Image (cartoon, grey):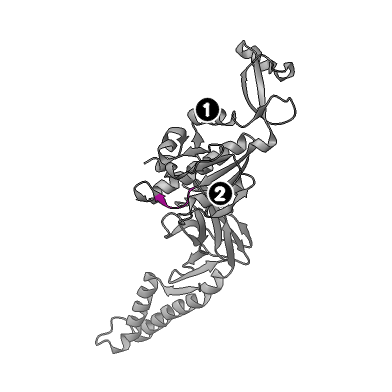
Amino acid sequence: MTMKVRLTPVGWLVLGEAALLLSSRWWPARAIPEPATMALGFALVAVVLAAWWLAPRQALAGEGEWLVAPRVPVGEEVTVGATITVQGNLPPCTILATNPLTRRREEVVRLRALSAGCVRPTWTVRFGRRGIHHLPPLRLRCTQPFGVISIDRPLGAGCEVVVLPALGQVRRALRERLDSWSAELQPTTDAGSDELDHLRPYRLGDQRRAIHWRASARHGELLVSERLDPGCRRLAIVLDTSGRGPQGVLEGRRFEKLVAATATLADACVRRGWQVTVHGGFAPGGISGDIPRLLEGLAMASCDGANLLDLIPAQPVVAVLTARPADVPAMPRRPLILGLADIDDLFRLPARLRA
């Protein structure tokens, strides 16, 4: 984008007055001597020409770029900003930026006159949808000197931001369901350094070293700590991206609810010590890693028509989030299947996804 130079309303008024004064030699009756009116008309034209020459050069004294995190959450207020570097003298001006929610350019900061240096103004925005957002370059608008010429020029280049899916919380019913489900995944009472899964009442034959003495003292009964083998703490979470629901095509908001529930479940399981991979049409081979990496992968999810059966990996520990639970095939070890009807009962999602 190039610099835009145009007359302001005041500039048009000044030019009109100049033209009127310069035409005074043809007035039938002169209230003011002709030399004075002609001189004043030429002075006004000189003001406009001087501003047309000076304003672009003053505006070029400032350079800038976006100051925004590479990953931001969807629907939440986030702080963004700009780095404005001034070489020379920059007159009072306004910084304009595109609002990612409305896609309209808005005035976000007004700067006073600046000398050589650097400033970092900030403001808050919301990103209304997940995925990759391209933010156009910032723009600088200035009407100095004299206020007759408006300069509108880009500052630096645009930037890309990955907007992550919404995160909610798992309800107590889902935590209990996860506990009972994980209890079937070959727990062990080995008192090694492996991750603690859950506590259960003491049973005849349990090893004495497996007793969790502090918890037993708090509850007034003997409790045994069960730990999961590392191989049993690998969980594949499958997001159905086929785009089909029980009533036909899956609507956008219902799919977003599935995505948010998948992200919330992945976050909860990683915090519990599971090694999580996320599968879908956006990543048939699965995405593994920490929570930011998993959420970044889910940010790319879309209804791509992928076959659900092709997305389910061979490993036995699988959780499937789908709008059509009946389509999940029988497996040697029954996966954890969560449909749209389960999400409102088992997850606490942001209000805009509950409708």
- Can residue 279 be seen in this snapshot? yes
Binning the other alpha carbons within 10 Å of mark 2 as few (below 14), some (14 to 19) or many (20 upward) gives: many
Task: Identify the image quadrant of residue 85.
Answer: bottom right
Q: Amino acid at mark 2?
A: His
Residue at the bottom extreme of this rendering: 26
Give the residue drawn at x 59%, y 28%: 183
Span highlighted in magenta in the image:
240-244
- Can residue 145 be seen in this snapshot? no
Question: Residue at label 2?
Answer: 279
Pick whichever, 204 or 275, lies toward us.
204
Q: Is residue 185 above or below residue 292?
A: above
Residue 312 falls left or right of residue 148 = right
Dot 1 falls on a residue whose secondary structure is helix
Q: Amino acid at mark 1?
A: Glu
By secondary structure, the bulk of the magenta-drawn segment is best described as loop
Q: Is residue 38 above or below residue 345?
A: below
Residue at the left extreme of this rendering: 28
Question: Residue at label 1?
Answer: 176
Binning the other alpha carbons within 10 Å of mark 1 as few (below 14), some (14 to 19) or many (20 upward) gives: few
